[in-house]
Amino acid sequence: MAKRDYYAVLELERGASEADIKKAYRRAAQRFHPDRNPDDKSAEDKFKEAKEAYEVLSDAQKKAVYDQYGHAGLEGGRGGGGGAGMNPGEGFSDIFGDVFGDIFGGGRGGGGGRSNGVFRGADLRYELELDLNQAVFGAAIEIDVAKLCECETCKGSGAAKGSNPSTCDTCNGAGQVRITQGFFQLQQPCPRCRGSGKIVKNPCDTCLGQGRVRRSKKLAVKVPAGVDTGDRIRLGGEGEAGRNGGPAGDLYVEVRVREHEIFEREAEHLHCEVPVSFATVVLGGTIIVPTLDGQVALKIPAETQSGRVFRLRDKGVKPVRGGARGDLFCKVMVETPVKLNADQRELLKRFDASLRKDEGGEHSPREEGFFEGVKKFFAAGTAK
């Protein structure tokens, strides 16, 4: 099977920077990693494909060869790397150190060395339901989020008051151990200290040595005007607390707008149906229609047909990412009179009869046109 273009695999434009390449691979790794898709063989294949693309595009020499010759250049041995495999002397874990550090915790510390058991806290997601008015005009809303926070008793160390964690004697505080599998040397979290590099012999009574406790926290969310279902608001540092002094994760507030009883939203525009009496659409008149800014008068011309749409400019939504405010589209729906008394029924019959006396169908152009079409349809069928 022919290989896909490496830039297409990572959804990048040619000429992408090193930082863009790394970010693109992080996204692909998070999405397709086998640990997150245990029963999806296609995800595993896509993960391997993204890994191969990253190995080439993150290497300046290989990238230059690939940009000039494509896959054939790598297969031909140009660039001194012998293809898209690992460079001589490059450890398997070194390839992934920068990429997976932010995803699974850890990663490289300052100066290119491994972090000493410092882990970033997990990101959290919160679904926020909004009324249409709140989404259109913005709002300040307080939410309550349950998350892992730093233990106030031990300040995140996990050790009881008056004691300190000791260095793990299995990994010597590195938090990582190296194992050899054939020609490869792999690096994985220390099984004893679980990557922290430290052992808590006298655990804190509050967090039981975990350094974090679960509790609720009230947060103020400023909802910008114009948001819609699917938009996300990021609250930096409001995710779960990190471990061993690591930074906290982020909280992503996902917006979901409730259905409105009158309006239906379509991007920056709003739509609604307006019931209008038979007399108003025949004779013309003015009706009052609702908008999110208040009521407005809408002039209905005489002989307006049911289903006609009127446009009220600048009565829609101003997009959150900028641009002109949308419009409100009002669809006229003629309301059929109900519960008529005898006199009203008689008047309506007389009115209908008076319309039918006139020949030519000038009072009901759509009805006349419809039945003419029906006649032509059956005439054509008979001719066959």
Image (cartoon, helix red, strand yellow):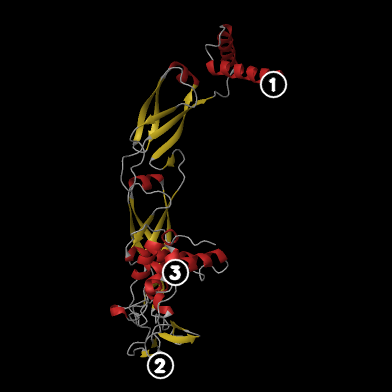
First in residue order: circle 1 vs circle 3: 3
Q: Position of residue 256 (x, y in %)?
A: 44, 52
Dot 2: few (<14), some (14–19), or many (≥20) neighbours within 10 Å?
A: few
Front position among marks 1 and 3: 3
Badge 2 vs badge 3, beta-carbon distance below 8 Å: no
Seen in the picture, residue 381 relative to 207 is either above or below; the reply is: above
Task: Look at mark 3 in the image and give the residue it sits on.
Answer: 76
- Identify whether 1 is placed above or below 259: below
- Residue at figure coordinates x 36%, y 74% from the top left: 242
Say which label, 1 or 2, has the lower sequence index: 2
Report which quarter residue 116 is drawn in: bottom left
The nearer-to-camera label among 1 and 2 is: 1
What secondary structure is found at the residue carrying circle 2? Answer: loop
Amino acid at circle 3: Gly
Residue matched to label 2: 169
The residue depicted at 44 percent of the width and 69 percent of the height is 76
Q: Is residue 217 visible?
A: no
**Quarter of the image containing the N terminus?**
bottom right
Q: Marks 1 and 2: CB-CB under 8 Å?
A: no
Residue 7 can be seen, yes or no: yes
Distance between the alpha carbons at the discs numbered 1 and 2: 92 Å
Q: Earlier in the sequence, mark 2 or mark 3?
A: 3
Question: Considering depth in this image, is 47 or 143 the residue closer to the camera?
Answer: 47
> Vertical placement of 169 versus 189: above or below?
below
Across and down, in percent, residue 46 comes to: 50, 64
Kindly identify the amino acid type of the residue bearing the numbered disc 1: Gly
